[in-house]
Amino acid sequence: TSGGGTFVSQHGFVGTVSGTYTIQVTYGTIATITVVSINHAESTLLRIAPVYTVITAGEAIDYQATATDMYDNQWDVTDAATFTTSGGSLLANHFTGTACGTYMITAVYKGQPAAATVTINHAAPAGLSLAPIDVAATAGSNVEYHATATDTYGNTWDVSDVATFTSSGGD
């Protein structure tokens, strides 16, 4: 044989590596060959990829599911697996997220689960708000202002520590 398994007796072949292989037999000076196709065994492990990823709100990512048998043969089962998510939008294996947070993506193939995590960060700011507004303060008092950015998906985050505050007027 040129691979794919081993002969466990004089003429008993056990295939373990999926693929197509040539089996040759020789008797004296005569030889002949045949072909054996080895298919994967039952799945014993399911993997999902990517396992952990970070995207920006509005972006999408495709997940792949890979099954492995006891002989370490691997094959793509993305189209046969069922994908679910704890947040965002999932169409088959295509995930789109708009709300900031960390979500779990689960794939199941023949009862075997695999999980991945996706974190969605806010998109570029589309708006900025300031609080408090229209304050009447006494001279010498301190007013704490806070700036909040909002992206096109409604995600908000505090930018007070990185925004630039200035004052003008006074009449």
Image (tube, rainbow, N blue to C red):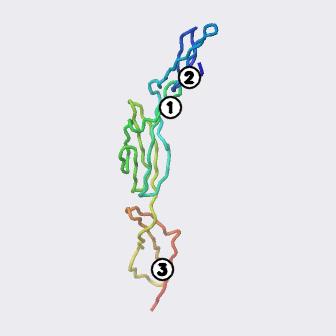
* Residue in the image at 38% along x and 30% along y: 111
Q: Disc 2 or disc 1, which is closer to the eye?
A: 2
Where disc 2 sits, the SS reads loop
Q: Amino acid at mark 3?
A: Ser
Q: Amino acid at mark 1?
A: Gln
**Residue 104 as seen in the image, left or right of residue 4:** left
Where disc 3 sits, the SS reads loop
Residue 170: x and y in percent read 46, 89
Query: In this rendering, is residue 111 above or below 139?
Result: above
Which residue is under mark 1? 74
Residue 33: x and y in percent read 55, 17
Of mark 2 and mark 3, the one earlier in the sequence is 2
Residue sitting at the far right: 29
Of the 4 image quadrants, the one containing the N terminus is top right
The answer to whether marks 3 and 1 mark residues whose Cβ atoms lie closer than 8 Å is no
Residue 76: x and y in percent read 46, 35
Query: In this rendering, is residue 2 above or below 135?
Result: above
Indicate the quadrant where residue 115 lies: top left
* Residue in the image at 44% along x and 83% along y: 138
The label shown at residue 141 is 3
Q: Amino acid at mark 2?
A: Gly
Q: Residues within 10 Å of mark 3 (few under 14, many from 20)?
A: few
* Residue in the image at 52% along x and 25% along y: 20
Of mark 3 and mark 1, the one earlier in the sequence is 1
* Residue in the image at 49% along x and 69% along y: 160
Q: Residues within 10 Å of mark 2 (few under 14, many from 20)?
A: some
The label shown at residue 4 is 2
Of the 4 image quadrants, the one containing the C terminus is bottom left
Of mark 2 and mark 1, the one earlier in the sequence is 2
Q: Nearer the viewer, residue 54 or 26?
A: 26
Indicate the quadrant where residue 29 lies: top right
Query: What whole-number distance in Å separates the C-alpha atoms at marks 3 and 1?
Result: 69 Å
